[in-house]
Amino acid sequence: MQRIEQVLKNEPKYRLSQVKKALFLDLIDDWEEATVLPKNIRERLANECPLNHNAKIFESGESGEKDTVRVLIVLEDGLKVETVLMRHGDGRNTVCVSSQVGCPLGCAFCATGKIGFKRNLKSFEITDQVLFFAKHLRKAGEKVTNVVFMGMGEPFLNYDNVLGAIRVLNDSEGFNLGARHMSISTAGITEGIKKLAGENLQVNLAISLHAPDDELRSKLMPINKKNNISSILKAVDDYIKKTKRRVMFEYIMIKGENDSEKCAKNLAKIAKRS
């Protein structure tokens, strides 16, 4: 929205409301469709804030039903990110968005980590992923109901742009998606957890744990050396105390690594404590 606001900075305030409606409610594909705007503004927006997506779609599902749609988006600088639509069959449609190109954390089980870190995504590059699928679903008379920050990258290492995207998606004049329908998944960046606790936003928080002890977690997730389990649990305790909201824990089962009976018992202790 920053680019759009720059284009409209000398225009009456109602122009921004008109643009938000065109983008997030009418889901226009071309600025020429926003006929409520004067031609000169449409031309400036087309030149400075293009709406076209350079994207390749991959669809999969059982019995021919396209319940999972994966999209590879080519950004303006030629870098690429993936975003995924999960259609649950009960009216819910969840978009899994990326927050970074690549990822600096290098988790052993994650393909994105092998790419390395390229750069943070800007807020509009994050919201564009959601808008892409909103337009895709509109053809079937459906809409995006949930957004999860579980794609490429660590959301809390791009905190400002992620929160900026959430505020745009939550804006009642814009996409108007309830904050409780959005979730942030973090590898345990405690500083991000602390900052989110003070945002007064009812977004959901999920912690990617994936191991019940520091030795194993550091092996699977090098970030644990800086943000170990005890520090994460303390940050979560403080978050719950401050926000009165539940926190989810995620655990990928990796054969021969974190799926032993001992791991299960240690994980149960963490779960009971939490």
Image (cartoon, rainbow, N blue to C red):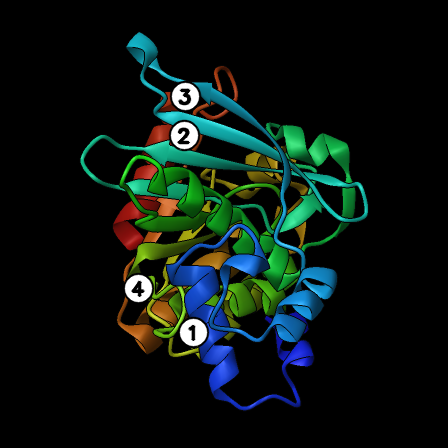
Residue 183 visible within the image: yes
Q: Nearer the viewer, mark 4 or mark 2?
A: 4
Neighbor class of circle 3 (other Cα within 10 Å; few <14, some 14-19, many 20+) is few
The quarter of the picture where residue 75 lies is: top right
How many marks the image carries: the answer is 4
In this view, the mark in front (4 or 3): 4
CB atoms at circles 3 and 2 under 8 Å apart? yes
Q: Which residue is mark 3?
A: 260
Q: Amino acid at mark 4?
A: Gly
Which secondary structure lies at badge 3? Answer: loop
Q: CA distance from mark 1 to mark 3?
A: 34 Å
User: For the C terminus, which image quadrant?
Assistant: bottom left
Q: Label 3 is placed on what type of residue?
A: Ser
Q: Is residue 46 above or below residue 60?
A: below
Q: Residue at x 63, y 81 (%)?
A: 8
**Marks 4,2: beta carbons within 8 A:** no
Mark 4, residue position: 178
* Element type where label 4 sits in the image: loop
Which residue in the structure is indicated by mark 1?
Answer: 197
- Element under disc 1: helix
Please tell me the numbered disc located at residue 22.
none
Q: Earlier in the sequence, mark 4 or mark 3?
A: 4
Q: Which mark is residue 263?
A: 2
- The residue depicted at 47 percent of the width and 49 percent of the height is 130
Instruction: State which quadrant residue 124 falls in.
Output: bottom right
